[in-house]
Each structure stands twice: as structure tokens, then as C-alpha cells.
Amino acid sequence: MENIIIRESSAKDAAQLLEYFKIVGGETENLTFGESGLPVTVEQEEAFLKNVHDEKTSVHLIACKNGEIIGDGGLTGLPRRMRHRAELGISVRKNYWNCGIGSKLMEELIKYAKENGIEILNLEVRSDNVSAIHLYEKYGFRHIGTSPAYFKTGDDYVDFELMFLDLR
Ligand SMILES: CC(C)(COP(=O)(O)OP(=O)(O)OC[C@H]1O[C@@H](n2cnc3c(N)ncnc32)[C@H](O)[C@@H]1OP(=O)(O)O)[C@@H](O)C(=O)NCCC(=O)NCCS
């Protein structure tokens, strides 16, 4: 964790984040996108990050080393009768796996949730993503069930675990 800073992202990080998503998307089959990253413009990403910043039940964090983004994690708040819940997502550059960055991001996201009145965290994770499931279980996430055929890549279907953390 030497020289690694975890901070909230801002609209100024939009361009660098879109590049990060392309890199991390090419390094793993575990995310909803691949090496093309997210199909949004820098302006759209700027607007998205500003909204996340302004919305109390959402937050987006980045892990940076020497100015380069090497990990990210976020909570996406839900509206109306689901306002007590947020969806959690996390990723780290492959070169830095198993160095504790994912754990640090999880700790900061759970801290944010507790401080901002979020009561339930939900996430979905590939059933074969053992390191991520280990990480989530380490922070108290419980399995709700399995969602069959959640991803389809080519002709292959991939099941996902649905997990939640009750902070009440
Ligand atoms: C999942 C991910 C975020 C974890 O980040 P990370 O920085 O490597 O996380 P950490 O180093 O804090 O912790 C990894 C844990 O997994 C454990 N682990 C690693 N490989 C494992 C395996 N094959 N089986 C079980 N546990 C494993 C490590 O021992 C460590 O646990 P510990 O803290 O109890 O020692 C990272 O691997 C990643 O970005 N993967 C690709 C994207 C992804 O899968 N995101 C999640 C989508 S739901």
C-alpha cells in the first residue's frame, strides 16, 4: 500500500477513468465490460461523476499511485423505497492484485455507507470469482442466492452470486 492514495473521484478524473476502464476491462473477464471500456464520452462521464458526488447515497473512489489510477470502487444509491440501499462495485489493476487495495477500498466504501445512512449494500459477482467472493465475505457480505446465466460471453453462460451486507 506504499504511495497509494485512495480518494473520491471528481469530474476532472473523467478522461483518465475512461482509460482506466479500458485497461482493467482488458485484464479480467469479471466486469460487465471488456477492453473497449464503457461506451460513454468524457463529457458524459464528467456529468456522471458530478451526479455521484452530489448524491449522498452514492460515492466513487479511486486508488492512485504516482498520479495513475490503479483501482476504483463505488456505491450507487437507489431511489424512492430503495433509498436505504446501494450497489457496490470494485476493481483493481491486475499488477496490484493481492496487495490489499481491494480491502482498503472495501473499508472506505463501508465507512462511507455507515456515515451516510446507507443500511443495505448489495452486489453481484461471478460465481467463479473466488478472490472477490473471499474479499466480500471477509467484510461480512452474505450470499442471497445464485442468479443463473447472468453473463453471456460468446456461447457461454456465467452464473452470479447475489450478496448483501446488512448495516442496520
Ligand atoms: C476482486 C479484486 C477487486 C480484489 O482486489 P485486491 O486488491 O486483489 O484485493 P485484496 O488484495 O485486498 O484482497 C484479495 C483477497 O483475496 C484472496 N485471494 C486471492 N486469490 C484467491 C483465491 N484464488 N481464492 C481465495 N482467496 C483468494 C487474497 O488472499 C486476499 O484475501 P486476504 O486479505 O484475506 O489475504 C481484484 O482481484 C479485481 O479487481 N479483480 C478483477 C475485477 C473484479 O473481479 N471485480 C469484482 C467484480 S464483482
Image: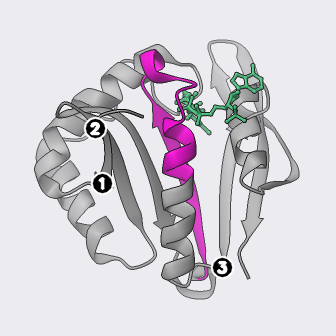
Residue identified by numbered label 3? 119
Looking at the rendered structure, the secondary structure element under dot 1 is: strand
**Start and end of the magenta stretch?**
84-106
Q: Please state the quadrant of the image where ligand 1 appears.
A: top right
Residue at image location 33% in from the left, 35% down from the top: 38
Q: Is residue 98 part of the magenta span, yes or no?
A: yes
Vertical order, 106 against 164 (above or below): above
| Amino acid type of the residue tagged 1 in the rendering | Arg
How far, Cα to Cα, is label 2 from label 1?
A: 8 Å
Q: Position of residue 158 (x, y in %)?
A: 75, 26
Quadrant the C terminus occupies: bottom right
Q: Position of residue 40 (x, y in %)?
A: 24, 41
| Amino acid type of the residue tagged 3 in the rendering | Glu
State yes or no: discs 2 and 3 in contact (Cβ < 8 Å).
Answer: no
Q: Is residue 120 part of the magenta span, yes or no?
A: no
Q: Position of residue 46 (x, y in %)?
A: 16, 54
Vertical order, 64 against 82 (above or below): above
Residue identified by numbered label 2? 64
Residue at image location 39% in from the left, 79% down from the top: 56
Q: Position of residue 6 (x, y in %)?
A: 34, 49
The answer to whether 133 appears left or right of 31 in the picture is: right
Quadrant the N terminus occupies: top left
Mark in the foreground, 2 or 3? 2
| Amino acid type of the residue tagged 2 in the rendering | Cys
Which label belongs to residue 7? 1
